[in-house]
Every structure is written in C-alpha cells, then in structure tokens.
Image (cartoon, rainbow, N blue to C red):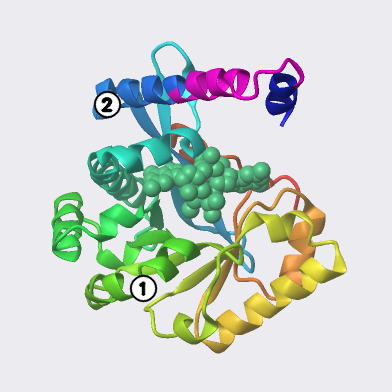
Amino acid sequence: DTAMYRAKSNGKPYEVFDRQMHESVTALLRLETDLRKSLVEKDFFLCYQPIVDLKSFQITGMESLMRWHHQERGLVSPGEFIPLAERTKLIIDLGWWAIREACQQLAYFQKEFSRPDLSVSVNMSAKQFAIHDLARLIGDVLNNACIRPGNLKLEITETVLMENAKAMIKTLNDLKLMNIDLYIDDFGTGYSSLSYLHRFPISILKVDRSFIFEITKKENFEIVRTIITLAHNLDMKVVAEGIETSEQLKLLMQLGCDFGQGNLFSVPVRNHEIAKMLSKSHRWDFL
Ligand code: C2E
Ligand code: MG
Ligand code: MG
Ligand code: MG
C-alpha cells in the first residue's frame, strides 16, 4: 500500500512497486536455491513438543517440528521454508527424512523410558499423500525403526484434507487399515464440511491455537466447547494447541479437553531436552 502510494505520488505508478516485488521474488528464489543445496542430513533437524494428557498430566506423545539451519541466515522457520519445499517437491525428500528421523527417535525414547505407549506425530503435506503406495512405504519405515503403527500419528491440516478429499480417501483408509492414526491439524480455521468429517478415519482434532489464545472470551470458549462436543460425539479426541497460560488450561480442563500442547508445557525442543521431560521425576512447575 505504502509502496503504491509513494509510487503514485511521484508520477510513476508501478516502478517502486515493481522493484519491491522484484526484490522479494529474488529473495524467495535465493532461499529456494539454498533449500535445494541444503543437505537433508546436515542442515535440518527436528524439534519435539510434548502432547500432554489433561487428566494424568503425563506426556502421551510429541509432535515433531522441522527446523532448517541456513548457513548464513541461521534458523529459518517452517512457516517460511515449508511452502518453498512444497513448491519444489523437495518436500517429498524432507518428508521421508522427517518420518524416519521421528520414528527412530521415538524408538529410542520408548526403550530408554520404558514407554511403549509413547507416540510421535508428524506433519504431512498434500504432496506426500499423493505418493503412490504411501501406506506400504510408511510401513517399511516403521518396521525398520521397530515402531508399532499405532504409535505413529500423521497430522494433516483441515484445508488439505477438504481440498483433496476424494483423492486421499483411499490412502487414508489404507493407513487406517494399518492402524496409523490421522490427526486433523489447525482445526476450525479451514472450511470443513461437517457432513464429510465422519467419513474420514480421523482419531483426533487439534483445535487451532487462535481459539485457545482468546479462550477467555465467551465466543471462543463456546466454539471450543462445540468442537469438543462434536469430536466426542464422533468418537474422536481433542488436542488443544498453543496453550500458553494456566488460565487457558483451566478452561480447557473444564470443557473436558483430552490433550494439551503449548508453550505452557514446553516450547518445541531438541531431543535431549524432551528426554528430561520424559524422565519419571519430571513435574510441571505450574501445577
Ligand atoms: P503446526 O503443525 O500447527 O505446529 C504448531 C506450531 O505452533 C509450531 O510452529 C509450534 O512451535 C507453535 N506453537 C506451539 N505451541 C505454541 C504456543 O503455546 N504459542 C505459540 N504462539 N505457538 C505455539 P512451528 O514449529 O513454527 O511450525 C509451523 C508450521 O510448520 C506447523 O504448524 C506445520 O504446519 C509446519 N511444519 C512444521 N514441521 C513440519 C514438517 O516436518 N512437515 C510439514 N509438512 N510441515 C511442518
Ligand atoms: Mg501440526
Ligand atoms: Mg497445528
Ligand atoms: Mg499451525
């Protein structure tokens, strides 16, 4: 807006705007080239954020969140590089690496802390669901890592699910037959056809953090209540994302929310940090 305004006021309507566009497009292309050059094994790593049972306050699982360590720029957030990776199909390689890495890490934690029930959830892009034979290939990864299929959860956003519903239903059913659970990410922000929801083999709805952020407001409280009721009536469970305060936590517990995730418990951390939380002696200090 400002660029356009400035441009217009000096009588050359598009020049400044064009230059800024050009600069940002160049920066993006640059990042995309860097992304291609980055070596999956070397420049990427996973962080983990605990998912906590809101009745027992035990960690029942963890979400893996990808990080890119750019040689010059330092950490680049997934909000920035995932869309680029998706455009370039690099997301396929990165995606396989993340699933393998997360499963191996989970196998280690299950053994180290005698927690065979512990699960990991991995974010998935639309392109990954188009992989031929996805279910079988994931089965191979699970076998190699010695992880039971029930302990791997795949997260897919509501929007991706609804926009590719027809194409994905077979893959999703194949995954379900293998006992791999599906989580719907950022629920409430996309456009869900409620009549469709029950047709998918979904086990958990993750309520988007925008609702949790202002759950102290009556309207948001009611929306979250409605989502929880809907989920429970459809035999699904609910994870609240982005819990930052004990007040938010209290309201969610009041509503019977099953699981919680957010900075109140822990920000996403490296594997050795989450290991500390998995040890028996760990207590949440806000309780
Ligand atoms: P998401 O799957 O919805 O992940 C949750 C995001 O919320 C994470 O951001 C996490 O750091 C952030 N978060 C968690 N608790 C809190 C909180 O209490 N307050 C606030 N303000 N934020 C919180 P992150 O790590 O930057 O990831 C952003 C998105 O990037 C993810 O959203 C996911 O869509 C995507 N992503 C991350 N890793 C992967 C991956 O391995 N594959 C794919 N395809 N996408 C990924
Ligand atoms: Mg997620
Ligand atoms: Mg989410
Ligand atoms: Mg999100």
Of 141 and 159, nearer the camera is 159
Using residue 240 as the reference point, say whether residue 77 is left or right of it.
left
Q: Residue at x 46, y 50 (%)?
A: 63
Q: Residue at x 29, y 42 (%)?
A: 91
Q: Main secondary structure of the magenta part?
A: helix
Q: Is residue 171 above or below residue 114?
A: below
Specify whether residue 143 is in view.
yes
Using residue 251 as the reference point, say whether residue 121 is left or right of it.
left
Amino acid type, residue under disc 1 in the picture: Ala
Categorize mark 1 by other alpha carbons within 10 Å: few (<14), some (14-19), many (20+).
some
Residue 133 image-quadrant placement: bottom left
Which residue, given by chain and number where applicable, does mark 2 sit on? 36
Using residue 3 as the reference point, say whether residue 183 is left or right of it.
left
User: Which comes before the other along the chain, label 1 or label 2?
Assistant: 2
How far across and down, in percent of the image, does residue 165 sit? 36, 73
Give the position of the N terminus as an image quadrant: top right
How far across and down, in percent of the image, does residue 116 sit? 34, 60
Which residue, given by chain and number where applicable, does mark 1 sit on? 165
- Secondary structure under tag 2 reads helix
Q: Disc 1 versus disc 2: distance between alpha carbons?
A: 30 Å
How far across and down, in percent of the image, does residue 228 sit? 64, 77
Specify whether residue 265 is in view.
no
Magenta segment range? 9-25
Categorize mark 2 by other alpha carbons within 10 Å: few (<14), some (14-19), many (20+).
some
Is 230 within the magenta? Answer: no
Q: Residue at x 65, y 55 (%)?
A: 209
